[in-house]
Image (cartoon, rainbow, N blue to C red):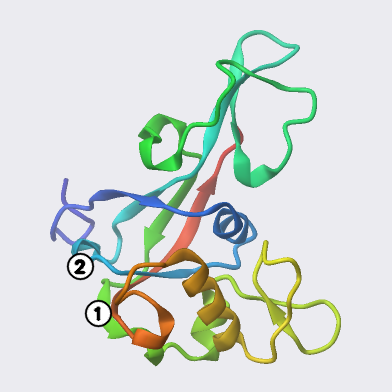
Amino acid sequence: MEDAEGGCDVKDHPILFSAPMVRALIGRDKTVTRRLSKRWLRVKAGDRLWVRETWALVFTDGPGWHRVYRADGELNRLTLCDGKWRPGIFMPRWASRIALEATEDAREEDLWSLGSEEALREGVEVFKRGNLYYLPGNGGMGVSEPRTAFSLLWDSLRTKPGERWEENPVVVRLAFQVTEVRNG
């Protein structure tokens, strides 16, 4: 399929996000992400990304079943169909509720090149009391700089040598806009 200007095909790419980052996507607070794999360099402006996240099938009072997502919190009165959550890495396209569109071509950069504005675009939020920043799901620990908050987020998701903040790995920066958030 050609784009409007007769250029290259628009491609679909699955992309995995943690529950706190899914909530930042839904709130439209997250518009960039950084990944370690060079395979993300294939993403071009206009490509579509569909979000993979932890999910389950549930029965409801009405007919049939529907999807629920761990990022949304507790299930309350709902019953899991088979009693288990499904890892996002195995989420099929039909179960995805969030669609993104790449707004720029992916590019490589050193992790430390991230500044405060970019940290905010990564989903770091302004703490409600005072001038502190925090990451969703980190227990409300506030820090004075968005970049510091992002470094804590990065290290909470990366444990392998060569991937940690203090090692300043080369990353692939993806910029996007949220184009769709559906209910289960």
Q: Residues within 10 Å of mark 1 (few under 14, many from 20)?
A: some
Q: Earlier in the sequence, mark 1 or mark 2?
A: 2
Label pair 1/2, CB-CB below 8 angstroms: yes
Q: Residue at x 38, y 42 (%)?
A: 89
Which kind of residue does numbered mark 2 sit on? Lys
Q: Quadrant of residue 127?
A: bottom right
In the image, 89: left or right of 97?
left
Figure quadrant of the N terminus = top left
The answer to whether 72 is drawn above or below residue 110 in the figure is above
Q: Residue at x 45, y 71 (%)?
A: 32
Question: In the rendering, at what x and y percent does residue 38 appear?
Answer: 20, 67
Q: Which residue is mark 1?
A: 108
| Mark-to-mark CA distance, 1 and 2 | 8 Å
Question: In the rendering, at what x and y percent does residue 70 appear?
Answer: 61, 41
Residue toward you, 51 or 86: 86
Q: Residues within 10 Å of mark 2 (few under 14, many from 20)?
A: few
Which kind of residue does numbered mark 1 sit on? Glu
Q: Residue furthest right?
A: 129
Q: Residue at x 60, y 81 (%)?
A: 149
Q: Quadrant of residue 109?
A: bottom left
Question: In the rendering, at what x and y percent does residue 178 appear?
Answer: 50, 57
Q: Which residue is mark 2?
A: 38
In the image, 32: left or right of 10?
right
